[in-house]
Image (cartoon, rainbow, N blue to C red):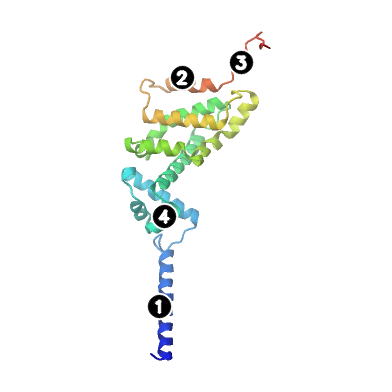
Amino acid sequence: MSTKNQTAKTTSTTRTTATAKTIRRKTATQRWGAGQNARPDEARLKLILAARTCYAEQAIEQTTMADIATRARVARATLYRYFPNREAVMLAVFREEARDFLEQFRRTVGEAESFCEFLLDYLVFTLKNAPKTPLHQALFSEQAALWVSRNYLGDPESMQLTTDFFRESFRVARRVGEIRDDLDLDEIVGYGARLLLSLLLLPPTEYKTEAQLRGYLERHFLRALRAQPAEPGRVKSRG
């Protein structure tokens, strides 16, 4: 083959490769459908919303990465770019659900002056209203409950959401001596989350009214947080 023909063949191959790359780039920009691009934060939220929709329509354990990608109208490679596996998607969905629920509580109930009352209001609100949310049945089904408990309680970011929500109220309570000095907020939130999960999975049927439920939570949780007033006339032993 002459040098001229080889040069022509090389040029043709280069153009073909460049055209293929251009087509792939165009395809990538249209992965969200309708030719729309999305910033990373928007793309991630779109995927989470798609997963939430899937979970509301079918069991979480039956939902695949392909199902979520199809719902979001993206390639599976795009989904894996943001989430390495199904567990990561489920955890992201749970966090968004937790954020939405905390905001709903803030709008509906507001913040009590006392930290313990604020926490009690939140526990009661969650037990009454979480079962009404669209994802509750999916998140707390018998098959999904173990995963939710293990991964949610072991996820620092999920725990941090609730910790940050109560931080200022806790700081005031500590300053005015409302709660015991040997407790920290992370410990309270961790125990409270475990208590909530157990009561959501196995609702206490013997407490039918809100007053009964508040009394139960006060006796078995809140009372342990409150600082005990010093008994009049009692002097600490120096021995």
Q: In the rendered structure, are the residues bearing label 2 and label 1 in contact, judged by CB atoms less than 8 Å apart?
A: no
**Of the residues shown, which amino acid type is indicated by label 1?**
Thr
Say which residue appears at 39% left-offset and 62% top-offset: 34
- Of the image marks 4 and 3, the number of the one nearer the N terminus: 4
Q: Is residue 230 above or below residue 195?
A: above
Q: Residue at x 51, y 41 (%)?
A: 157
The answer to which image quadrant residue 140 occupies is top left
Image point 65% across, 27% down: which residue? 175
Query: Mark 3 vs mark 1: which is more N-terminal?
Result: 1
Contact check, label 4 and label 3, Cβ < 8 Å: no
Give the foreground label among 3 and 1: 1
Q: Is residue 177 visible?
A: yes
Which circle marks residue 16 in the picture? 1
Q: Look at the numbered disc 1 and give the secondary structure of its residue.
A: helix
Q: Secondary structure at mark 2?
A: helix
Q: CA distance from mark 3 to mark 2?
A: 20 Å
Q: Is residue 178 left or right of residue 126?
A: right
Of the residues shown, which amino acid type is indicated by label 3?
Pro
Identify the amino acid type marked 2.
Gly
User: Is 71 or 89 nearer to us in this picture?
Assistant: 89
Gap in angstroms between the C-alphas marked 4 and 3: 55 Å
Residue that carries the numbered disc 3 in the rendered image: 229
- For the N terminus, the image quarter is bottom left
Residue 171 % position (x, y)? 62, 31
